[in-house]
Image: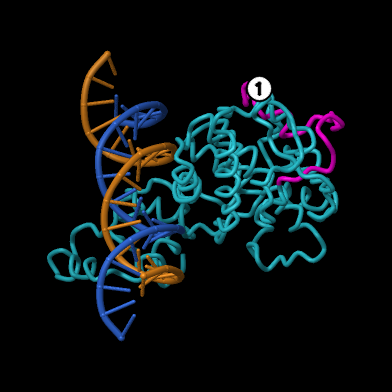
Chain colours: A cyan, B blue, C orange
DNA sequence: AATGCTATCAACCGCAGCTAA
DNA sequence: TTTAGCTGCGGTTGATAGCAT
């Protein structure tokens, strides 16, 4: 969202507040640069809080509520703007699977991101995918789809982004605002092996006919865009090291064993972000698909969720 | 170029919880 | 204990940019 658009006052708003009588009334709608300036300078001098009094004292013809919202969602210096990184998206998916629509709680674990932003992200992008899949966004099936297709993809993107050729300019310039945890994570703790999609010798798919394991590639997965859905080795030979996916794919309640350190404020450092081990160790037999529609579901989910790339 | 449609996101609304009087 | 005011949260709306036709 660009600033000019945000700060530009709509025609209706101008009309609504144009005459002198209404100038004494509370303003609504988009904030002007002058209002922003008033709010910023007042808070710089007096601090935030006591919003109703602040609004009056600062000379703003706004409700305290409006001032608070404007400050917290837009003007506060540490607000991070721009697209959510794959790391952040992954964290949102995980925390939402744990807490549901507790946006403010989720936002507390994404420094610089607001509950409003996360809520918008969820509603406009995540729920859109659910609609395209024709499934309830909060349903177990959708969560399954997200975990089986979307999260591995995000992990792969994260891996790509940490490769030497990664162009950091595409991510937020104030990524450092993420704080120490993200800096430490990207440099040390993510433990993402360097690998290219072509390094996966074997593709796999969920064989829903027996409800269990990988077989050779089905034609429905011959889409090159589905490279994220590849495996370096058969599941039978998979490593058993605990990781985020192994722990989280319906081996029990998410809150019981998901790979985020409850004692450690849910920072990204709590996630095992090794995409290789994630894909190797997931037991697809737990994926809750109806056998009769499994082919369609897999195709549909994979294709649809792949398109989340654009998100 | 004009029009319609979709996606995005800032801002608003209603409600619930908290606190001080 | 009650009540009024404040704050924060989650759901929803509306403006607008961008894309498609």
The answer to whether B16 is drawn above or below residue C5 in the figure is above
Q: Quadrant of residue A149?
A: top right
Q: Is residue A154 magenta?
A: no
For disc 1, the neighbor class at 10 Å (few under 14, some 14 to 19, many from 20) is: few
Identify the residue at horizontal 63%, vertical 37% (top origin): A147
Highlighted magenta segment, given as a residue range = A229-255
Residue C7 spot, x, y in % from top left? 40, 41
Residue A112 spot, x, y in % from top left? 58, 52
**Residue in front for this viewpoint, B5 or A189:** B5
Residue A81 spot, x, y in % from top left? 55, 60
Assign a secondary structure to mark 1.
helix
**Residue in front for this viewpoint, A157 or A4:** A157
Identify the residue at horizontal 83%, vertical 35% (top origin): A234
State left or right for residue A1 relative to residue A275: left
- Looking at the figure, which quarter contains the C terminus of chain A? bottom right
State left or right for residue A227 relative to residue B9: right
Residue A212 spot, x, y in % from top left? 71, 26
Identify the residue at horizontal 78%, vertical 57% (top origin): A162
Q: Is residue A189 visible?
A: no
Q: Which residue is mark 1?
A: A256
Q: Is residue A284 visible?
A: yes
Q: Quadrant of residue B13?
A: top left
The answer to whether A233 is drawn above or below residue A128 in the figure is above
């Amino acid at each position: 969202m660009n600033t000019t658009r945000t700060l530009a006052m709509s025609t209706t708003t101008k009309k609504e507040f144009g005459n002198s009588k209404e100038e004494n009334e509370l303003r609504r709608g988009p904030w002007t640069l002058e209002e922003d300036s008033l709010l910023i300078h007042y808070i710089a001098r007096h601090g935030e809080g006591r919003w109703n009094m602040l609004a009056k004292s600062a000379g703003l013809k706004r409700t305290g509520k409006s001032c608070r919202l404007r400050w917290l969602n837009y003007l506060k210096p540490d607000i991070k703007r721009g697209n959510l990184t794959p790391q952040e998206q992954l964290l949102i998916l995980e925390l939402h699977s744990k807490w549901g629509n507790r946006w403010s709680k989720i936002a507390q674990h994404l420094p610089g991101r607001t509950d409003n932003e996360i809520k918008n992200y969820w509603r406009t992008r995540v729920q859109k995918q659910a609609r395209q899949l024709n499934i309830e966004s909060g349903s177990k099936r959708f969560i399954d789809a997200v975990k089986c297709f979307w999260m591995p993809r995000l992990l792969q993107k994260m891996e790509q982004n940490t490769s030497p050729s990664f162009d950091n300019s595409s991510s937020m310039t104030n990524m450092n605002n993420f704080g120490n945890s993200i800096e430490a994570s990207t440099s040390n703790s993510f433990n993402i092996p360097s690998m290219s999609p072509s390094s996966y010798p074997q593709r796999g798919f969920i064989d829903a006919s027996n409800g269990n394991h990988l077989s050779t590639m089905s034609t429905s997965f011959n889409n090159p865009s589905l490279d994220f859905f590849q495996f370096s080795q058969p599941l039978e030979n998979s490593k058993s090291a605990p990781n985020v996916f192994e722990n989280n794919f319906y081996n029990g309640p998410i809150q019981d064993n998901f790979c985020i350190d409850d004692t450690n404020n849910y920072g990204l450092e709590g996630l095992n972000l090794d995409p290789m081990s994630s894909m190797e160790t997931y037991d697809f037999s737990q994926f809750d698909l109806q056998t009769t529609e499994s082919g369609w579901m897999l195709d549909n989910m994979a294709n649809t969720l792949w398109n989340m790339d654009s998100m």
